[in-house]
Image: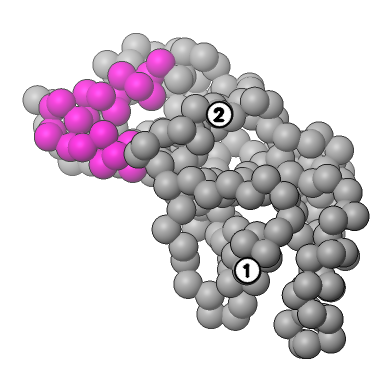
C-alpha cells in the first residue's frame, strides 16, 4: 500500500523519540493512504515552519496487519471504541499503549473541538457519535515502535539497501545470539544505519560486509 507523510521537511530518517505525544493514537510516526490529506498537513506545517512543506511517499507492507509478532489495533470507522481510545491518548499524562501499529480515522480540527465539548459535558457521547456518521472519510496509520517501522519502505530508498538491512540483522542474530527483534533495534538505531540511508555518504554502494564491520566497530563488537 502506498502511504504518505505530510511535514515541513522531507523525511529521510524516522526518529520516534521526536514524534509528538498525545496524538490520536499516541506517540508514533503517522502516515495516510489519502494523498490529499498528507498534502494538507504538508502545507499547514510548511506555513507554520516557513517552508513549502513536503510529502514523503512510502510503501507500507499490509502483511503487518496479520503479523503475529506485532500488536495491531484497527478501527474501520468512527465509533465508541475509537473515541475512547483517542480520548485516552490525548489526555494529559496519558500512558503509552502497548500497540505497534494502529489504523483508523483521524480526529481533525472539527472533531477535536467536538471532543473537547464532549469532555466538558457540553454534548453527550451518543450525540457526538451520531455526528461522526456524517464526517468525511479520513485515514491514518500510527507506527509506534521500531519493529513496526520495518513495515515501511521509503520509496526513494534504494532496493539494495533493503537487502542489506535483512542480511545485517540476520547476521547480528546468528553471530551474537540476539533475537531478531533485538538485532532490528540495534541496527536501526545505529549511526551506521543513518549513514547508510544518507545518499551523500554513498555507503549503500559498499559491500554489505564492509557496512557490517562498521556497525560492529560502532557497537564495540568483534567479528564472530
In terms of sequence position, does the residue under pointer 1 or pointer 2 come before the other?
2
Q: CA distance from mark 1 to mark 2?
A: 25 Å
Quadrant housing the C terminus: top left
Q: Quadrant of residue 146?
A: top left
Pointer 2 local density, CA inside 10 Å: few below 14, some 14–19, many at least 20: few
Q: Is residue 97 magenta?
A: no
Q: Which residue is mark 2?
A: 62
Q: Is residue 177 magenta?
A: yes
Instruction: Note whether 188 is above or below 165 in the view shown.
Output: below
Q: Residue most toward the left?
A: 224
Instruction: Note whether 76 is above or below 213 in the view shown.
Output: below
Which residue is pictured at 85% across the width and 56% down the height? 133
Q: Closest to the observer: 217 or 180?
A: 180
Q: Position of residue 121 (x, y in %)?
A: 78, 87
Judging from the image, the colouring scheme is one colour
Q: Quadrant of residue 90?
A: bottom right
Q: Nearer the viewer, mark 1 or mark 2?
A: 1
Q: Residue most toward the bottom?
A: 121
Please state the extent of the stretch shown in magenta in the rendering: 163-185
Pointer 1 local density, CA inside 10 Å: few below 14, some 14–19, many at least 20: few
Instruction: Check residue 49 in the rendering and tell me which mark sits there, or answer none.
Output: none
Q: Main secondary structure of the magenta part?
A: helix
Instruction: Check residue 84 in the rendering and tell me which mark sits there, or answer none.
Output: 1
Q: Closest to the observer: 52 or 177?
A: 177
Q: Position of residue 17 (x, y in %)?
A: 50, 57
Q: Position of residue 173 (x, y in %)?
A: 20, 30
Amino acid at each position: 500500500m502506498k502511504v504518505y507523510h505530510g511535514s515541513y521537511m522531507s523525511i529521510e530518517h524516522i526518529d520516534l523519540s521526536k514524534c509528538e505525544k498525545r496524538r490520536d493514537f499516541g506517540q508514533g510516526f503517522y502516515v495516510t493512504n489519502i494523498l490529499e490529506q498528507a498534502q494538507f498537513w504538508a502545507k499547514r506545517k510548511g506555513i507554520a515552519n516557513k517552508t513549502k512543506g513536503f510529502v514523503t511517499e512510502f510503501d507500507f507492507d499490509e502483511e503487518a496487519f496479520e503479523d503475529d509478532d506485532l500488536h495491531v489495533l484497527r478501527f474501520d470507522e468512527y465509533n465508541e471504541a475509537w473515541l475512547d481510545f483517542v480520548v485516552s491518548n490525548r489526555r494529559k499524562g496519558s500512558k503509552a499503549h502497548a500497540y505497534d501499529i494502529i489504523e483508523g480515522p483521524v480526529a481533525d480540527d472539527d472533531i477535536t473541538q467536538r471532543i473537547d465539548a464532549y469532555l466538558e459535558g457540553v454534548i453527550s457521547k451518543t450525540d457526538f457519535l451520531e455526528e461522526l456518521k456524517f464526517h468525511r472519510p479520513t485515514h491514518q496509520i500510527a507506527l509506534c515502535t521500531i519493529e513496526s517501522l520495518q513495515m515501511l519502505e521509503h520509496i526513494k530508498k534504494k532496493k539494495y539497501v533493503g537487502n542489506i538491512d535483512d542480511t545485517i540483522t540476520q547476521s547480528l542474530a546468528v553471530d551474537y545470539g540476539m533475537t531478531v527483534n533485538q538485532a532490528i533495534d540495534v541496527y536501526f538505531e545505529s549511526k551506521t544505519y543513518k549513514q547508510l540511508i544518507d545518499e551523500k555518504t554513498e555507503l549503500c554502494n559498499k559491500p554489505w560486509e564492509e557496512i557490517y564491520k562498521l556497525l560492529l566497530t560502532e557497537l564495540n563488537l568483534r567479528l564472530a
